[in-house]
Amino acid sequence: MKAIVRHNKITNTIQFRVGKFSLIYAIPSKLKYIKEISNYEDGFITMQTNYGEEYTDLIELTSNGIFPDSFKKKMSDILSALKLSDIKLERG
């Protein structure tokens, strides 16, 4: 399964989408662009940005979000199964 990471500079958000499942989360306004996704392991993503590294634990973000338990379980399973090579960065 492939995932897409899309950075939206206007809203200061990142959308992490896998199939029909999607997470959108806020990022610091100082993040102007993402150079690359440098690491991904068990839901923990590391991105190289204009100011250094940005880290996000996507599983924790999902678990602590206001989502139905069924979504949390499915998204957690999907995030745990992904590899760095499955993730594509889209700039927008």
Image (cartoon, rainbow, N blue to C red):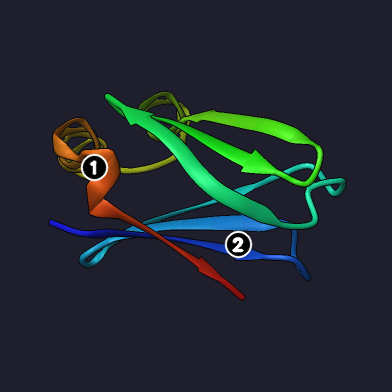
What mark, if any, has residue 75 been given in the picture?
1
Q: CA distance from mark 1 to mark 2?
A: 20 Å
Foreground disc of the pair 1, 2: 2
* Residue at 46% over, 35% down: 65
**To which residue does mark 2 refer?**
7
- Nearest the viewer among 76 and 68 is 76
* Residue at 78% over, 46% down: 50
| Residue 83 location (% of width, % of height) | 22, 38
| Residue 27 location (% of width, % of height) | 70, 44
Q: Is residue 77 left or right of residue 22?
A: left
Q: Say if 32 sits above or below 51 in the image.
A: below
| Residue 69 location (% of width, % of height) | 23, 35
Q: Say if 56 sits above or below 85 in the image.
A: above
The answer to which of marks 1 and 2 sits earlier in the sequence is 2
Say what amino acid the circle numbered 1 marks: Met
| Residue 3 location (% of width, % of height) | 29, 57
